[in-house]
Amino acid sequence: MASKLFINNTGFQVNGNLVVRAGTVPGNNLNSVQFTLDSGIGSQQKIEYGDVNNVFVDALQLSSLANGGYIISNQIIETRGGVLDDLFNRYDTITVAMQSQSFVVTSSNTWATTLANDEIY
């Protein structure tokens, strides 16, 4: 099973829906995993999804009731190897922040292990 670490830096509770890709071609959806990130700045949650044959994220939907409004973001991958595909599938950690009533999503590797020969696992 694949997993991503989500970090919430919005200061608000964030509801998420992670759409799992079936295989390697964007648009072929296997299923989705719903989750809720606590409102504390820096709160973290590890989300497990997919299986050994289906490890790619195909879309990320976020929503939050914040500052008197309902904020929604829906990011869907259309092209394999594009910027959004890399954002969701090349890194183990996704950080969610908020700026001007919009979600800002970034990614990084925070828990991959580097071996002596510089291979990352």
Image (spheres, rainbow, N blue to C red):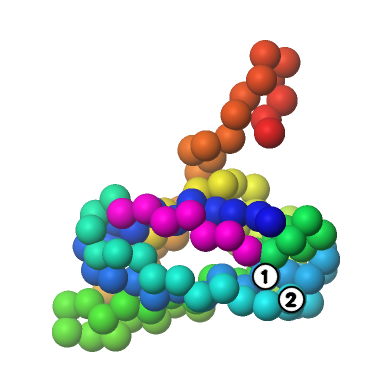
* Residue 56 in picture, x, y percent from top left: 70, 61
Asked whether the residues under the numbered discs 1 and 2 touch, taking CB atoms below 8 Å apart as contact, a structural biologist would say yes
The structure residue drawn at horizontal position 60% and vertical position 29%, both measured from the top left corner, is 113
Q: Is residue 38 left or right of residue 20?
A: left
| Count of number-bearing discs | 2
Query: Which quadrant does the N terminus fall into?
Result: bottom right
Q: Is residue 65 left or right of residue 86?
A: left
The numbered mark at residue 118 is none
Q: In this view, does 48 lie to the left or right of 29?
A: left
Residue 39 appears in view: yes
The structure residue drawn at horizontal position 66% and vertical position 60%, both measured from the top left corner, is 85
Magenta-colored span: 43-49
Residue corresponding to mark 2: 30
Report if residue 11 lies within the magenta region. Answer: no
Residue corresponding to mark 1: 20
> Cα distance, mark 1 to mark 2?
5 Å
Residue type at the position of mark 1:
Val
State which tag comes first along the sequence, 1 or 2: 1
Image height of 114 relative to 84, above or below: above
Residue type at the position of mark 2:
Leu
Element assignment for label 2: strand
